[in-house]
Amino acid sequence: MTIEGPPIARQAPTERTFHGDTVTDEFAWLMAKEDPATIAHLETENAWTDQATAHLEPLRETIFQEIKARTQETDLSVPSRKGAFWYYTRTEEGKQYGIHCRVPVRPGETAPPMGDDKPGEQVLLDGNELAEGKDFFALGTFDVSPDGDWLAYSTDFDGDERFTLRVKNLTTGEVLADEITDVFYGSAWSADGSVLFYITVDDAWRPHRVWRHTIGGTDDELVFEEPDERFWVGVDLTRSEKFIVIDAHSKVTSEVRVIPADAPSTDPVLIAERRQGVEYSIEHHGHRFLILHNQDAEDFALSWTSADNPGEWIEMIPHQPGTRLESVDAFARHLVISLRRDGLTGLRVLTDGSTASYDMAFPEPLYSVGLTANPEYETSSVRITYTSLITPDSVYDVDLNTRVQTLRKQRPVLGGYDPDAYEQFREWATAPDGTRIPISIVARKGVPKEAPALLYGYGSYEHSIDPYFSIPRLSLLDRGVVFAIAHVRGGGEMGRQWYEHGKMLAKKNTFTDFVAAAEALIRNRWNTASRLVARGGSAGGLLMGAVANIAPERFAGILAEVPFVDPLTSILDPSLPLTVTEWEEWGNPLESAEVYAYMKSYSPYENVTKQDYPRILAVTSLNDTRVLYHEPAKWIARLRSVAPEGDYLLKTEMGAGHAGPSGRYDSWKEEAFNLAWIIDVLKA
């Protein structure tokens, strides 16, 4: 299909030379965010997209109403106990944002109060009130002090993830004059709630400083600064509430310091000096710090060191290749290890003082499980979340001694949802190098072979796309569309090697794995190339741009959300947000001619050619600080310029960030737009 598209604005191209290679960029002018010509271009593209998709408006409205009708709009989360209160979030019909609340624990009460009636409810923060009159709203920090008297919270009204931090007195309801701008995610309270630790970012949006703020004070004190531009910093309070933890980490290296929470003015104590390539994290447990690490342990091992005098690491769980240990959570008498094996997540329980352990058992062949809110240290019960491609998100409390799992709540799906009407599968594709690539598939029972299909992928940062339930996805499945996830290399689904073999100079494996998954769907007669759409976002948007270039014939359409499609330009510019921290993921093309040539060989923007492309929809946000808006804007412009015989659309949210619209109704409308476009491409 040929869609002419709006006229392409032209300005003087720029040239750049690296390692003897000169590249001309005719759309570099779009990087000037404040230039009226840039804004005019984006608004023209939006107008064109509105016109080109106007025929889908009835379908969009239908899908939006389907999502709304299946969602219990007035609802609440399962309350979590911390100290003398149960904490929870509730939503109300017609309101965009959650309302954060708590109620006192009643005498003898051991299970969360699940009824709608909550005597003594205190509203801690109402997102709808904070967002009133704003086009965008997001919370960064929501942190109640150990004594329950103070709330630290931060807000963003632009989508650029630069937050303003405030403190609320939960006894009086007063929001203090304490107000700190340009802070990052994360905070930690001292034991007595008199001191709050928080993080600020540098000009490249890298969190690099930890500060100490005394409540009511004005002169904040710098606690830690990370000078190495590859490293981020974070701050947190251990579950035991005994230590403030300051961690500095790059993509491949970690370093951790601690401050006693009852002595917040003391200097941080180093746990272990950073060693290039060694990652570790800590958790406090009684007399020791638990250390999850990859020193001589590719898939990680668990050790411990003295909390009084950190030094030697003493092994607790040795490295077992193929079983990736992802985190450790410490409770007074138990440890819970989050792991993955054979492409599935899992939870392992260890009783303190014993070498015995057991893995929690779950009924389905495909699922995702993990710990959720567990603020209490003195407990023998933990809360987990469980979901699959057909099982709605479910919250269980698990007795760690008896192993009994008690369902507290399963996400309501209104309108008579029947999980037995759907089926899920795991299939395998074979990559060009012989590696077997897992594919998770869900479809409505009885769907004929060669049905229309949507294939999703990500494949970067060791981030795994595990099987998950989605209410909006039902609008696809019930129209006969098959949904599949390609668990490509670069993610972490199959352990650390899966990640290592999909990054740096092995990045192309991510792309060829995805193409192999598409070919497997076609070969196994799930669908045909003319009825297959690919979808991915952020680094998964890079995947979308790459497969559009290398295998356009395999797809009828490609949906690329906030897509990282101009990686070479971005990674070559250390002044841009996040660039230096990304060099350990992609390589440093500034210093390495080999890395430069390799990145240039797969960069979607650099490799647009005059060929037949599938239909493409790129969705981005003007205030995105992770993948800047100009990457998809330039990509679509070059597609129209170089390969004009195609249908290319760009949709820019002019007041949002990386995650798109912030309100739930606005998010549903955005997803309805995307799903209507997919259905139109698939002719479902």
Image (cartoon, helix red, strand yellow):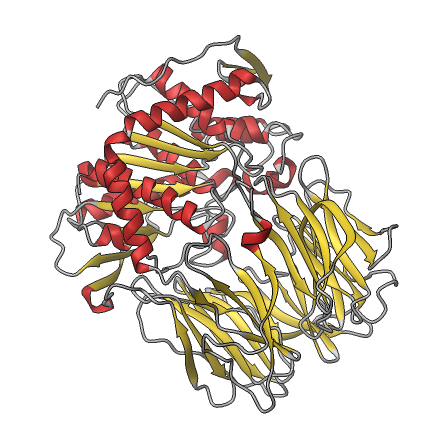
Q: How many marks?
A: 0
On the image, the x and y values in percent for residue 278 come to: 65, 56
On the image, the x and y values in percent for residue 641 come to: 37, 15
The answer to whether residue 273 is seen in the rendering is: no
**Residue at the image point whose x is 46% and y is 45% from the top:** 502
The answer to whether residue 349 is seen in the rendering is: yes
Tell me: 467 left or right of 520: right
- Of 365 and 379, nearer the camera is 379
Name the quarter where the N terminus is drawn. top left
Q: Quadrant of residue 316?
A: bottom right
Question: 565 above or below 424?
Answer: above
Tell me: 671 left or right of 350: left
Q: Quadrant of residue 172?
A: bottom right
**Residue at the image point whose x is 65% and y is 42% from the top:** 162
Question: 279 above or below 350?
Answer: above
Tell me: 370 left or right of 4: right
On the image, the x and y values in percent for residue 460 come to: 48, 46
